Image (tube, grey):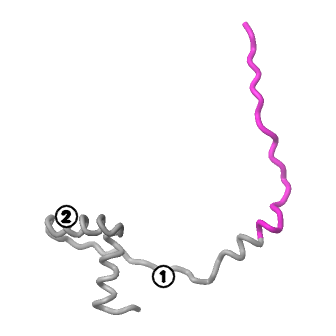
């Protein structure tokens, strides 16, 4: 019976991350935190849902984005 040798990668080190990596992580937060969101669930007729979904697909948009825009038009931005 022969034995098969499997080589495992290099051993991890305890070296700290380079300062450049830390600076990058700290600099990428631009202070523009997204607004907290709340979920809104509504029931619509199947035919309306199908129509909305088809039109969003043709425009390449998401239903949630379209509905959010309509609600902002009606009720304004907060």
Residue in view at x 77 percent, y 72 percent: 23
Write down the quadrant of residue 43 in the picture.
bottom left
- The label shown at residue 35 is 1
**What residue sits right under mark 2 in the picture?**
50
Mark 2 closeness class: few <14, some 14–19, many ≥20 residues within 10 Å: few
Estimate the spatial distance between the alpha carbons at disc 2 and disc 1, rounded to whole Å: 29 Å
Specify the farthest residue to the top. 1
Q: Quadrant of the N terminus?
A: top right
CB within 8 Å, label 2 to label 1 = no
Q: Position of residue 50 (x, y in %)?
A: 19, 64
Mark 1 closeness class: few <14, some 14–19, many ≥20 residues within 10 Å: few
Give the overall secondary structure of the magenta segment.
loop
Decide whether residue 25 is among the magenta residues: no
Q: Nearer the viewer, mark 2 or mark 1?
A: 2
Q: Secondary structure at mark 2?
A: helix
Q: Secondary structure at mark 1?
A: loop
**Figure check: 69 above or below 7:** below
Decide whether residue 11 is among the magenta residues: yes
Q: In the rendered structure, which segment of residues is drawn in magenta?
A: 1-22
Residue 7 shown left or right of residue 69 in the figure: right
Q: Position of residue 62 (x, y in %)?
A: 35, 69
Residue in view at x 77 percent, y 29 percent: 7
Q: Position of residue 51 (x, y in %)?
A: 19, 67
């Amino acid at each position: 019976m022969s034995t098969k040798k499997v080589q495992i990668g290099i051993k991890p080190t305890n070296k700290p991350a380079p300062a450049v990596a830390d600076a990058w992580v700290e600099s990428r937060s631009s202070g523009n935190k997204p607004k907290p969101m709340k979920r809104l669930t509504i029931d619509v007729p199947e035919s309306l849902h199908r129509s909305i979904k088809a039109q969003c697909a043709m425009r390449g948009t998401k239903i949630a984005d379209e509905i959010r825009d309509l609600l902002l038009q009606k009720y304004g931005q907060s």
